[in-house]
């Protein structure tokens, strides 16, 4: 069985399988894949560094899986709250710079491999085409947001706009990119 | 399937974008965190945005997108060790020979000596060998700076045939219509150690 075969299962069902040791390997991979974007986004927001957020996500999710295996999750359906609680707990450790140098035993190696196959991948060639269709101002706002990591106020100052205008442009541009990507994916 | 199909109170699209852009007040972001960890439908939307962010970052590092260049992008490229070529400067009416050196990731160019006073919107029409290939609409130029600075997709320039002319027409968009401010030409030549003297 592959992790994809469990993609229709609820978070709680995955946690229950891990706790019971029933198809646990693929359930762990699917749980990791399902939560990694959320944990990484949480980590990036608090740690302000993409690479560190990636390490943080790995630490959190392996801690979660160890906890579920060990029966520390009382109700399988509360796995989301358990992951969130682990995020907050480990964030305190990371901020105190007492993060663990986690060495991956063989028992956890298979989980990390799930990250190599994210469920959502935006095609770069298609995105490059769609970006070029945006007005230059909108395209620049997207690059300043996602590449230069500038917030609305900073972009407003750089492009001589109001902050609210930057947010409107960003919202409109992302909607247009989504629409363009969908059209190209469906061949329209 | 939309988030509304699976989520009783989906995170507003603009709020989720601001969350990914780290552009929310902490208490608003905390509330979204809490929701996301309990909602797979909204988490899937987050994953899509995160994937787009990752792809934009890669394209920006690889010089595959034309954009206006300011201090923020320059600083980020420098921090990332991206090799930026910033040698090509044209004035209106001029033709400038230019190339793409080996190893260059991002190709910058600038047009100087512009009088943009009184303009509200600038478009830049881009032609290759007299054939219009695109229009950079709503180019965010600073009227006080007398120049525009931008990138050209590096691979497209690198693959251009020797002698290809990239013509930029700078146009002011006004209530009465489009007014040509001026144009200039970047003439691509194949790179060699002696390309400047060719």
Image: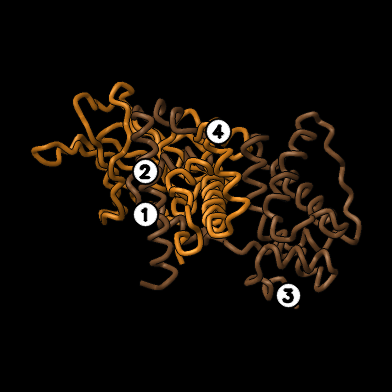
User: Would residue A148 be seen by someone viewing this image from the given angle?
Assistant: no
Instruction: Give the quadrant of the C terminus of chain A.
Output: bottom left
Q: CA distance from mark 1 to mark 3?
A: 35 Å
Q: Chain of mark 2?
A: A
Nearer to us of marks 4 and 3 is 4
Q: B113 or A144: which is nearer to us?
A: A144
- Give left or right: position of B66 versus A85: left
* Quadrant of res A23: bottom right
Q: Position of residue A179 (x, y in %)?
A: 38, 60
Q: Chain of mark 1?
A: A
* Residue identifier under label 2: A138
* Residue identifier under label 1: A176
* Residue identifier under label 3: A2
Q: Residue at x 38, y 51 (%)?
A: B163
Q: Position of residue B150 (x, y in %)?
A: 40, 38
Q: Are marks 4 and 3 on the same chain?
A: no
* Residue identifier under label 4: B27
* Quadrant of res B88: top left
Looking at the image, the residue that sits furthest to the front is A74
- Which chain comes out orange in the rendered image? B
Q: B143 or A29: which is nearer to us?
A: A29
């Amino acid at each position: 069985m592959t992790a994809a075969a469990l993609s229709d299962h609820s978070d709680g069902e995955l946690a229950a399988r891990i706790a019971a040791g029933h198809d646990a390997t693929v359930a762990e991979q699917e749980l990791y894949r399902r939560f990694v974007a959320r944990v990484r986004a949480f980590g990036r927001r608090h740690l302000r560094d993409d690479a560190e957020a990636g390490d943080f996500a790995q630490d959190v999710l392996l801690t979660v899986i160890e906890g579920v295996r060990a029966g520390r999750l009382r109700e399988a359906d509360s796995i989301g709250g358990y992951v969130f609680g682990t995020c907050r707990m480990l964030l305190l450790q990371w901020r105190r710079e007492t993060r663990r140098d986690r060495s991956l035993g063989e028992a956890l190696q298979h989980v990390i491999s799930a990250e190599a196959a994210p469920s959502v991948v935006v095609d770069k060639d298609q995105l490059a085409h769609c970006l070029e269709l945006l007005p230059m101002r909108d395209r620049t706002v997207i690059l300043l947001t996602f590449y230069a990591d500038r917030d609305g106020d900073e972009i407003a100052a750089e492009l001589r706009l109001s902050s609210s205008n930057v947010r409107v442009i960003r919202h409109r541009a992302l909607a247009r990119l989504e629409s363009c990507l969908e059209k190209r994916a469906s061949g329209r | 399937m939309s988030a509304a199909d699976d989520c009783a109170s989906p995170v507003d699209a603009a709020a989720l974008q601001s969350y990914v852009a780290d552009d929310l007040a902490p208490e608003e972001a905390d509330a979204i965190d809490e929701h996301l960890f309990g909602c797979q439908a909204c988490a899937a939307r987050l994953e899509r945005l995160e994937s787009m962010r990752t792809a934009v970052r890669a394209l920006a590092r690889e010089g595959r997108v034309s954009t206006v260049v300011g201090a923020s992008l320059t600083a980020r490229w420098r921090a990332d060790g991206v090799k930026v070529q910033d040698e090509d400067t044209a004035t209106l009416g001029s033709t400038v020979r230019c190339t793409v050196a080996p190893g260059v990731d991002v190709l910058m160019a600038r047009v100087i000596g512009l009088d943009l006073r009184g303009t509200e919107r600038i478009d830049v029409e881009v032609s290759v060998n007299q054939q219009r290939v695109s229009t950079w609409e709503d180019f965010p130029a600073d009227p006080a700076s007398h120049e525009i600075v931008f990138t050209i997709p590096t691979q497209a320039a690198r693959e251009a045939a020797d002698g290809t002319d990239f013509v930029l027409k700078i146009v002011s968009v006004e209530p009465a219509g489009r007014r040509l401010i001026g144009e200039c030409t970047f003439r691509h030549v194949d790179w060699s150690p002696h390309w400047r003297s060719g």
